[in-house]
Image (tube, helix red, strand yellow):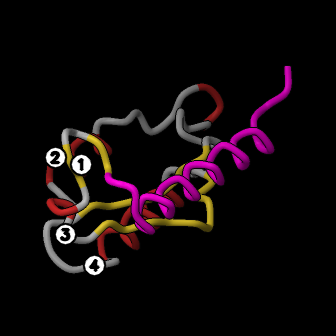
Amino acid sequence: MTGIMKAQIDWLPLSLKGGIRPTQGKTLAVMQVSGGSQSFNAVNQMRILGRWMRLLTIPNQSSVPMAWSEFKDGRMKPSPLYDRVVDVMEELVKFTTLTRRRV
């Protein structure tokens, strides 16, 4: 995980009213792209950070290795990896719908 990502997380306020974090109860999907082979170290680290920030992390995740070969003209090419990303996003929408507060 990059230092820039960690710095952004450090700047999140730790509490609002009543000790509730601004991230608490929100849903989180974890995905990564890499220039080389797959490594789930960053994905695992993000899952731990998600729990620390009291986010509801969906079980599904995705990793796109050799991202330089998966994109053309700014879009991801059709492939099994693309299908996996779509699958993760569909699950994120389902979890968000199921867990959001009803007013």
Q: Please say if the residues under marks 3 and 2 sit with CB atoms less than 8 Å apart.
A: no
Is label 2 or label 4 in front?
Answer: 4
Q: Which residue has dot 1 on it?
A: 5
From this view, report whether residue 95 is shown above or below residue 12.
Answer: below
Crowding around mark 2 (Cα neighbors within 10 Å: few <14, some 14 to 19, many 20+) is: few
Is label 3 or label 1 in front?
Answer: 3
Q: Please say if the residues under marks 3 and 1 sit with CB atoms less than 8 Å apart.
A: no
Q: Which residue has dot 4 on it?
A: 38
Q: Residue at x 40, y 64 (%)?
A: 79
Q: Please count the marks in the image.
A: 4
Residue segment shown in magenta: 77-103
Q: Amino acid at mark 2?
A: Ile
Magenta stretch holds residue 27: no
Q: Please say if the residues under marks 2 and 1 sit with CB atoms less than 8 Å apart.
A: yes
User: Where is residue 19 shown, x and y percent of the image?
Assistant: 60, 37
Crowding around mark 1 (Cα neighbors within 10 Å: few <14, some 14 to 19, many 20+) is: few
Crowding around mark 3 (Cα neighbors within 10 Å: few <14, some 14 to 19, many 20+) is: some
Quadrant assignment, res 18: top right
Q: Residue at x 50, y 50 (%)?
A: 53
For marks 4 and 1 on the same chain, the one whose residue lies earlier in the sequence: 1
User: Where is residue 42 shown, x and y percent of the image?
Assistant: 30, 69
| Residue at the limit of the structure toward the right, as seen here | 103
Mark 2 vs mark 4, CA separation in Å? 21 Å
User: Where is residue 41 shown, x and y percent of the image?
Assistant: 30, 77
Q: Amino acid at mark 4?
A: Gln
| Residue at the limit of the structure toward the front, as seen here | 78
Q: Amino acid at mark 3?
A: Met
Determine which of the numbered discs, if any, sits on residue 66 in the image: 3
For marks 2 and 4 on the same chain, the one whose residue lies earlier in the sequence: 2
Label 2 element class = helix
Magenta stretch, overall SS = helix
